Image (cartoon, grey):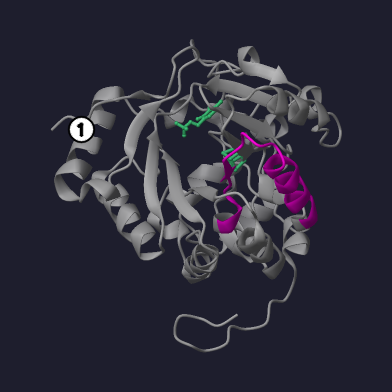
């Protein structure tokens, strides 16, 4: 690969599959790699038993060593607060169980349905609303999409299919291409969307095979990335985004508004600026879904609205993400209006 400065980038030491396999999964490993005081990890082993720690080395390298409050670290470090129960916080925070149309196929909104393609992610985000998603119940030990595909084929109102998970880019390029072909063969499916964090946490995932698939796919493809903080976008991520864009796909980003991570207008303004430089437009800024174990990330609505108001006052409209909340029964994500 050629970098922006025109110099060939160093040859990659390992493939993305190796990097996935070598992700850090033990809190002690993390403490050692970052030079963190062990007392910060007191009860995190217990939290990690509920939802395992998982972070690829390439993301780890963007965390500031020795800073227990680093906003990237906070997204992935299991902490004691996760063990406290809070009223209103549960296993199915946005009513997905009621939205199951076929194994692994969820539909809440008109015209688009979401396919759970895999349970695997490169990183485990502590605030993930699918922390307790019953993956095995939905997709078994390995993905079985036949029923979901049959259901999509039967329902002519489904124009857009969203590949989700887990992270769909955990699948091999061959499987993605094959799933893409099956969907493209259904005449009423017009768009394919991919919700993924992998180009961000594991930029080497954007390999030649993936780009080949995107260049040759017959359906228009939209990638919705998931980036919460400007420091997540390093040079390798910017290169991965540029390579994705060069295939002609549309690149958007969704963030979750997280206390202690990005609940400052300055941080989100910088995020929008960096996204734009990387060829990505901000799409949604999600209010936290009330999943068990994540209450310490909550930002009060009033504060969320005033942050959104500051962004709206500072940035062109196309760089302002829409502040929304996912609710169990509404016909769309519900907008929280910015306080101006
Ligand atoms: C968020 C979500 C979508 C996508 O909604 P958009 O507003 O189109 O981005 C689709 N299906 C489900 C179940 C969702 O949760
Ligand atoms: S990458 Fe997405 S699905 Fe995976 S843990 Fe993070 S938020 Fe959840």
Quadrant that contains the C terminus: top left
Magenta-span inclusion, residue 98:
no
Above or below for 210 versus 127: below
The quadrant holding residue 258 is top left
* Camera-side residue of 201 and 242: 242
Q: Would you say residue 11 is visible in this rendering?
A: yes
* Residue 292 seen in this snapshot: no
The local crowd at label 1, few if under 14, some if 14 to 19, many if 20 or more residues have their Cα within 10 Å, is some
Residue behind label 1 places its C-beta within 8 angstroms of ligand 1: no
Q: Position of residue 86 (x, y in %)?
A: 50, 15
Residue 173 spot, x, y in % from top left: 75, 57
Question: What is the x, y in percent for residue 139?
Answer: 79, 29
Q: Secondary structure at mark 1?
A: helix
**Image quadrant where residue 121 sits:** top right
Please provide the residue range marked out in magenta. 174-199
Can you say whether 283 is above or below 107 in the image? below
Placement of the N terminus among the 4 image quadrants: bottom right
């Amino acid at each position: 690969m050629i970098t922006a400065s025109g110099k060939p980038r160093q040859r990659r030491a390992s493939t993305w599959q190796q990097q996935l396999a070598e992700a850090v999964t033990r809190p002690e490993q993390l403490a050692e790699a970052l030079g963190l005081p062990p007392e910060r990890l007191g009860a995190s082993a217990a939290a990690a038993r509920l939802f395992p720690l998982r972070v690829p080395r390439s993301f780890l390298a963007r965390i500031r060593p020795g800073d227990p409050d680093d906003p990237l670290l906070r997204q992935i470090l299991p902490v004691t607060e996760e063990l406290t129960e809070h009223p209103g916080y549960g296993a199915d925070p946005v009513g997905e169980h009621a939205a199951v149309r076929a194994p692994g196929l969820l539909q809440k909104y008109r015209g688009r349905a979401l396919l759970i393609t895999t349970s695997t992610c490169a990183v485990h985000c502590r605030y993930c609303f699918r922390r307790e998603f019953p993956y095995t119940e939905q997709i078994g030990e390995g993905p079985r999409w036949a029923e979901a595909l049959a259901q999509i084929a039967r329902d002519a109102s489904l124009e857009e299919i969203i590949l989700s998970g887990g992270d769909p880019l955990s699948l091999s390029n061959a499987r993605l291409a094959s799933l893409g072909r099956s969907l493209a063969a259904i005449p009423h499916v017009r768009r394919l969307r991919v919700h993924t964090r992998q180009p961000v946490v594991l930029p080497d995932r954007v390999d030649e095979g993936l780009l080949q698939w995107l260049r040759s796919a017959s359906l228009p493809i939209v990638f919705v990335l998931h980036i919460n903080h400007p420091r997540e976008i390093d040079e390798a991520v910017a290169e991965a985004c540029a390579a994705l864009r060069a295939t002609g796909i549309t690149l958007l980003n969704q963030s979750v508004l997280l206390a202690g991570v990005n609940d400052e207008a300055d941080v989100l303004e910088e995020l929008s600026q960096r996204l734009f430089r990387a060829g990505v437009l901000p799409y949604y800024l999600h209010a936290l879904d009330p999943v068990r174990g994540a209450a310490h990330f909550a930002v009060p609505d009033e504060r969320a609205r005033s942050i959104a108001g500051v962004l709206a006052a500072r940035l062109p409209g196309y760089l302002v993400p829409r502040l929304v909340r996912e609710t169990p029964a509404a016909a769309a994500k519900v907008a929280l209006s910015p306080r101006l």
